[in-house]
Image: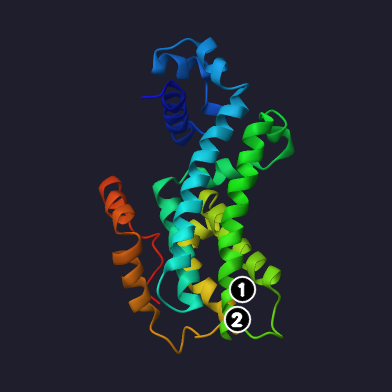
Amino acid sequence: MDREQLIIDHADDLLAEHGYHGLNLDQLAERIEYSKATIYNHFESKEDLMAAVDLRHLKLRAELFSRALIFPGNSRERMCVVGWADSIIAQMYPHWSSLHQLMETHSIQEKVCQTRRDSLQKIGHRCFEVAYEIIRQARLSGDLPQDGPSDAHILCGLISLAKGAHLLESNQSSFLLKAGIRPLDMLSLNYDIFLDGAQWKPLHTEFNYQITDQRIQSDVFAEELAHLQQITSNTSHLPPAQ
């Protein structure tokens, strides 16, 4: 295995186990059986290494998102593929949402090498471009009204719903726990409420999106879901049948 990838692999594991403050480079060096100096030969700082981990997951996210563009269905079904991709990544790598949010702060970014910062920005834009293209297709096909909310408004709304759910899931309040509320379990319904409000057709009350979910599971993400089934028996975060 490539030495740099080995370092990233074990750094990812440590971040999953202990979070940002638990990523100790001395412990990492012991795990990979190389010196700490070797780590610094590949990464300028701890934050630069974290950026490499973030970039790995962001590339996967962009790849899964891109599958939506070739999904045979209407524009809203293709946006469902994006929602499934986001949900699958959240389950496979539950620590990544917090890591990615941390990497967006200025105090962290300034310690990341410019090349990696540029790569993160480029891959991040690719994810936005997929969503924007689906919204554009919806306008052209008439699924979205021309006089409705702007493309930016819709995209910002979807991102806000997703980020809010991930944040609440990772930092659940005692009220949410007591009420038995799992934010990620509610995300699909919240998407539907928002998109129905934007008049993105077909509305969820007028179309069998349960069949769409089944097609996405079998035709788009079968391999990822099989892998997920191997690493966890908890599938409660998957988008519920609509």
Q: Distance between the residues labelled 2 and 1?
A: 6 Å
Above or below residue 17? Residue 175 is below
Q: Residues within 10 Å of mark 1 (few under 14, many from 20)?
A: some
The quadrant where residue 134 appears = bottom right
Q: Do the residues labelled 2 and 1 touch (CB within 8 Å)?
A: yes
Residue type at the position of mark 1 = Arg
Which residue, as the protein is rendered here, is positioned at the far bottom? 206
Name the mark on residue 140: 2
Name the mark on residue 136: 1
Residue situated in front as seen by the camera: 31 or 201: 201
Left or right relative to 177: residue 48: right
Residue situated in front as seen by the camera: 226 or 183: 226
What quarter of the picture does the N terminus occupy?
top left
| Residue at image point 56% right, 15% down | 41
Above or below residue 118? Residue 157 is below
Mark 2 lies on a secondary structure that is helix
Q: Colour scheme of this structure image?
A: rainbow
Left or right relative to 224: residue 104: right
Q: Residues within 10 Å of mark 2 (few under 14, many from 20)?
A: few
| Residue at image point 69% right, 32% down | 114
Residue type at the position of mark 2 = Leu
Above or below residue 78? Residue 62 is above
Above or below residue 203? Residue 31 is above
| Residue at image point 46% right, 87% down | 205
Query: Tag count in the figure?
Result: 2
Mark 1 lies on a secondary structure that is helix
Residue 117 coordinates in the image, percent (x, y): 66, 37
Residue situated in front as seen by the camera: 168 or 214: 214
